[in-house]
Amino acid sequence: MKRIIINSTNRSEAIKEAVAVLNAGGIVIFPTETCYGVAANATNQDSVDKMLAYKRRPEGKAISIAVNSPEMAAKYVSANSSALDVYDKFLPGPVTVISKSLGKVAKGLEAENGTLGIRIPDYQLALDLVTELGGPISASSANSSGKKTPYTIEDILDNLSKKQKGLVDLILDVGELVHNPPSTVIDTTKMNMQVLREGSIRLDDKHEEFDIESAEEMQELGEKLILQQQDSYIIKPLLILFNADLGAGKTQFTKGVAKGLGITEVVTSPTYTLIEEYPYKNGKLIHFDAWRIERIEELEDLEIEKEIKPGNVIVIEWAGATASFFEEFIKNQDVDFIEIHIDYTSLTARKVKIFQ
């Protein structure tokens, strides 16, 4: 493993050396505007395989790519009008835009559903690295999955195994980075843009934060929230809108909500059934998963609007996919709503942000 401390005199040569490593099937630690990332040559299978071994990424977990322009992005994804709007408004910047992949990158980067995340970093060294390579690099943080966000090289090295360290070919070290949040992830392949993870791009910063260490604590937080709302959801319906990654704890939180409502029935994920209903003394808990919803017409067929009435608590997972549908109720009817964001801080710990 070679480590180069970047300065004004060696910067250009360091980038050329990094490109040589990537073309030879190696991986490089490099800085971005959010944290240190691990770069693989996104079109070189050996390089990507090495990066995936380094990351110890759970199987099926996609890796985004960094490009230097919308024109380069167009070679690897089919960007619809929603994606192009995000490019225009937020890129370069800390935003990852998910589009349909064209199948031009190495195996292991695309999601199982054939989508691919695009980043255009707002960090000149990262852009220069992509430009010098002439193609995309992987845009994943350099920490091993579940470890702390790396703002220094020591943050990385202190949390790697000997085997992982042996996989790193080159480190481009610019010192400690500004402690910015991770990129905002927006899925533009749904009927409406869906925020899968929020970073520094957010509409409203008024929220409460909770550090959760276990499934039990996540359930306790859900129970606490609904007990705080018990005087209101009987009078008017309550929408609980989730934006959180897969496996983040949405169903555990909902189990706590159910407990707070006095529901003893076992709450399960509605991923395959779309909707699960649980009666309680004043109405129903309705647990809705919007992940597979593609068109507004599907929501109309489900007639879920009939369930938005006093006494009912409606929990919506992947709420971004149904935003325009439920916004009408929030704007035009007497409805309470709470938005919940859940971010990974480790394999077992979560940061929960509650906006209400």
Image (cartoon, rainbow, N blue to C red):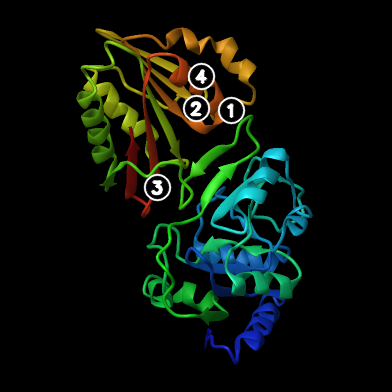
Q: Which residue is mark 4?
A: 328
Q: Which residue is mark 1?
A: 292
Measure how far apart labels 3 and 1 are at the Cα level.
21 Å
Measure how far apart labels 1 and 2 are at the Cα level.
8 Å
Q: Which residue is mark 2?
A: 271
**Between 259 and 298, the one nearer to me in the picture:** 298
| Disc 4 element | helix
Q: In this orientation, does residue 273 appear? A: no
Badge 3: few (under 14), some or many (20 or more) residues near its Cα, within 10 Å? Answer: many
Of pointers 3 and 1, the one earlier in the residue sequence: 1
Measure how far apart labels 1 and 4 are at the Cα level.
21 Å
**Between 135 and 328, the one nearer to me in the picture:** 328
**Hey, what amino acid is under mark 2?**
Thr
Q: Which residue is mark 3?
A: 343
* Numbered disc in front, either 1 or 4: 4
**Hey, what amino acid is under mark 3?**
Asp
